[in-house]
Amino acid sequence: MRTLTRLSPSPDTTERQGSAGAPRAHESAVKHVTGRAAYIDDLPAPADTLHVALGLSPVAHGWLNRLDLEKVRSAPGVVDVITLADVPGHTDIGPVFPGDPIFAGDEISYVGQCLFAVAAESHKAARLAVKEAVVEIDERPACLDPVAATEREEFVRPTHVQERGDWQRALDGAPHRLEGEQFVGGQEHFYLEGQACLVVPTEDEGVMVYTSNQHPSETQKLVAEVLDIPFHAVTMEMRRMGGGFGGKETQASPWACIAAIIARRTGRAAKLRLPRAEDTRATGKRHPFHNRYRLGFDERGVLAGGEITVIGDCGYSPDLSDAVVDRAMFHADNAYSLGDARVTGHRARTNTASNTAFRGFGGPQGMMIIERAMDDIARHLGEDPLTIRKRNLYRAADDSGAARDVTHYGQRVEQLSLLHDIVAQLETSSDYWQRRREITAFNATSPIIKKGLALTPVKFGISFTVQHLNQAGALLLVYTDGSVMINHGGTEMGQGLHTKVCQVVARELGLDLERVRISATRTDKVPNTSPTAASSGADLNGQAARDAASKLRERLFDFAAAHFDRENGGLDREAMRLEDGHLVAGIGESERRIPWGELTQAAYMGRVSLSEKGFYATPLIHYDRASGRGRPFYYFAHGAAVAEVEVDTLSGEYRLSRADILHDVGDSLNPAIDIGQIEGAFIQGMGWLTSEELKWNDAGRLVSDGPSTYKIPAFGDLPPTFNVELLEGHPNSQASIYRSKAVGEPPFMLGISVWSALRDALASLVDYRESPALDTPATPERVLMAAETLRRRAEDATSPRRSDHAPA
């Protein structure tokens, strides 16, 4: 059973027109399912297009002693071969901080690092030519342990600290204290469409770049710098991606830069598409984390304070790791008031591909440690974990009157009742306590199969934590037949952003959705755009599109007031509105209705501009890194999930039997798309925490580099009972687009409930007296080892003690 939300009441016109608030299908849905949606590899390429293959390092760390490419250059079909020495401009393409050479120089930093590129007449010829290279590397020991790197202070960026109150005093004075640590595994993006680009040389030494890319403006900048040409000579176009999840925010740029160099050198188009295994080895992942906590709490399990440390495994270079670890720190509290607390974040350097953005951007890894602590405190006190979680939710004040609505970085949590309402509503709708009693009774009589249940909340901050990225632009074009074209700086990766932006424009102009079309994201239409990331796509670009549409609407009202019904003094400007494809002026018997097409045609004949640009910058947000305090988020999105699992404790195998989700999206822009996002995010989060295991051998080579060795969730992993509902009646307290809330990343962390339910099932082996250590991903092997450890402890606890003099 899959229960969809009850849609909030909305005007008939909104439902009929499909404008913002209506549950409409994805704008490319039919193209997706019929195979007509064009991705980079589907685009028709010029007849003389060259195909590019890469020479990658087989060694994780060392010094490049010899790179002999003579046989590569003379291989059949080869037209060009390039290395670091052939780059005309910048050689470092680090997106924020330096450290990412386009090709390796003297030092080799990870297996899969690019050494050279080959351009040939065919893809096969290029790949065969790569094998002719003579590469000699003086191999050195590789660092693959971020904890060891932290101890040696080998960081890609400085350590950062956030602190509120006297955490040491709070910890020392607490009646109870616990500490724990965990390893949180990384995650491969596994987008269906791999890294790909097509670069075509243009006049005036420029290039046209078609790219599967979440941040076209950044790639435009890097391509221009690598070619040593002005930004305006580079145009990026991106119609859609076959998935991104953060993996194409910064790490789509190197391939575009390489193809652009070849296109400019040869005067021919260049196409680069990474095979799956090479894509997986050459690109970064979700950051693995090592987390630790030391927390003090009272007899009721309420936190007094303590410290949390997170260590992000950043790979060999900074990439986006500064911001990723920052967000892990921001979310080390999840939905709970930590009291007086210090949170420390380290950015460890290791000899792997530079880890990068991934849905949640460090937030999920940060939340894991406090969710472990909630379970641990509950077992320590003999309480249900849900009880402890509810007592620690952000609230106005504690029993002493101390504020409990301010985070450890100084931001006040607004809409406090939301978290409590969501948990209470889901607690009831999922029959949590009845199921808890049934599961406890079942486990008492079932020695092998154990069931587990967990309800975990989510509080996720929405905004880029780098302030200047919180801006967006849009370009609106209206044609004389009344059809509308919108372009904005966001990119479509399947999440429905383009659909929502079209709905915003349709609502502002009072049109059917079918009259509004969106064009590909292009840097020559909307410049200097931010990446489509941080769950901000609809918030930023929707507001920019609304700004453009509202300005154009007001201009048309001004024109119509003077142009129509002149003999009667014109139309009433103040009573105008756009609805049902008409300009409506006046009310009752004096109402005048002018078709939209007639209005736009008349405006054109009256020499009124029918295009408009829009812009939006998120207000209020700021963060001072020196003090570790500020308001980095415009608002918080919330949600909660209940997961029920069944575990075979003799094999470690398990299944998710039921999931119940209640999620907060404010006043939804599109309930159908939002529910799909929630379902997909939950399953992807579950995969991260259960089956998706990244494995490197001792030499630093990634061995889980394809679907045969890396297991993402499949259809059969969905729970038989999967109830998803949107929270109703709680519009966003901030002035977001139509009081909606972001939905891209927040529901990803609902998957934590599955991991917590597994721990709950295992805890039943020791009568819930202990909360087992369970690193992630919680594969069947890890679950089995945790079960065996608990069984041994249970046997030791029940075995009679032998005296020191008793016979063995």
Image (cartoon, rainbow, N blue to C red):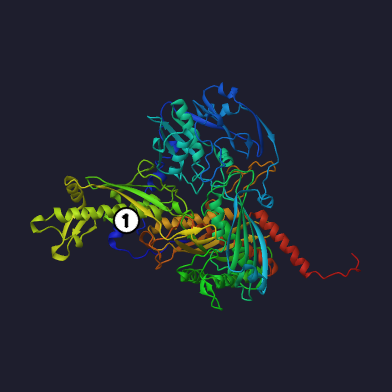
Indicate whether 805 appears above or below 672.
below
**Residue 584 picture location, percent across and down:** 19, 59
Q: Residue at x 60, y 34 (%)?
A: 105
Q: Position of residue 203 (x, y in %)?
A: 37, 29
Task: Work out whether residue 571 or residue 45 is closer to the camera in this orientation and state it.
Answer: 571
Image coordinates of residue 598 in percent, x first then y, are 18, 50
For the residue labelled by badge 1, is the local secondary structure a helix, a strand or a loop? loop
Q: What's the residue at 73%, 61% (across, down)?
A: 789
Q: Residues within 10 Å of mark 1 (few under 14, many from 20)?
A: many
Nearest the viewer among 721 and 461 is 461
Q: Mark 1 is on which residue type?
A: Gly
| Whether residue 324 can be seen here | yes
Mark 1 — residue? 18
* Residue 656 visible at all: no
Instruction: Give the position of the C terminus as an image quadrant.
Output: bottom right
Residue 155 horizontal side relative to residue 38, left or right: right
Q: Please report the residue visible at 38 percent of the width from the left and 46 percent of the height from the top.
A: 30
Residue lying furthest left: 567
